């Protein structure tokens, strides 16, 4: 069976935690920031976990993660 290719875009966006969960960054923090409150922008800094329903799709894109 041939090697599986890693989805390069996904590889740059997701990391695995020590316990095996998949970590992601939050969206909406790159531009048009003047209308967003400081509290909201601080919230974007914190990472988040991929939802359990999306984990299978992410793992399929990242077979060697």
Image: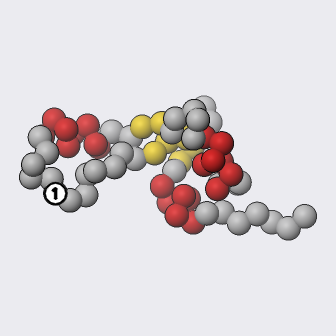
Which of 20 and 6 lies nearest the eye of the viewer?
6
**Which residue is pictured at 58% across the width and 35% down the height?**
53
Which residue lies most toward the right here? 1
Q: Nearer the viewer, residue 56 or 48?
A: 56
Q: Is residue 53 left or right of residue 27?
A: right
**Which residue is disc 1 drawn over?**
32
In the picture provided, is 27 more to the left or to the right than 32?
Answer: right
The residue drawn where x is 11% and y is 40% is 37
Residue 40 lies in quadrant: top left
> Where residue 43 sits in the image (x, y, percent)?
26, 37
> In the image, is residue 37 above or below residue 61?
above
Spot occupied by residue 29 in the image (x, y as percentages of width and height):
26, 51
**The residue tagged with tag 1: helix, strand or loop?**
loop
Q: Against 32, is 51 above or below?
A: above
Q: Is 54 placed left or right of 64 in the picture?
A: left
Image-based side of 26 in relation to 32, left or right = right
Q: Residues within 10 Å of mark 1 (few under 14, many from 20)?
A: few
Dividing the picture into quarters, in which one does residue 48 lie?
top left
Q: Quadrant of residue 3?
A: bottom right
């Amino acid at each position: 069976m041939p090697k599986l290719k890693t989805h390069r875009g996904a590889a740059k966006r997701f990391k695995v935690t020590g316990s095996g969960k998949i970590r992601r960054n939050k969206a909406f923090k790159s531009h048009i920031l003047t209308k967003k409150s400081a509290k909201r922008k601080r919230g974007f800094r914190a990472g988040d976990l991929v939802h359990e329903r999306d984990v299978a799709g992410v793992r399929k894109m990242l077979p060697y993660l």
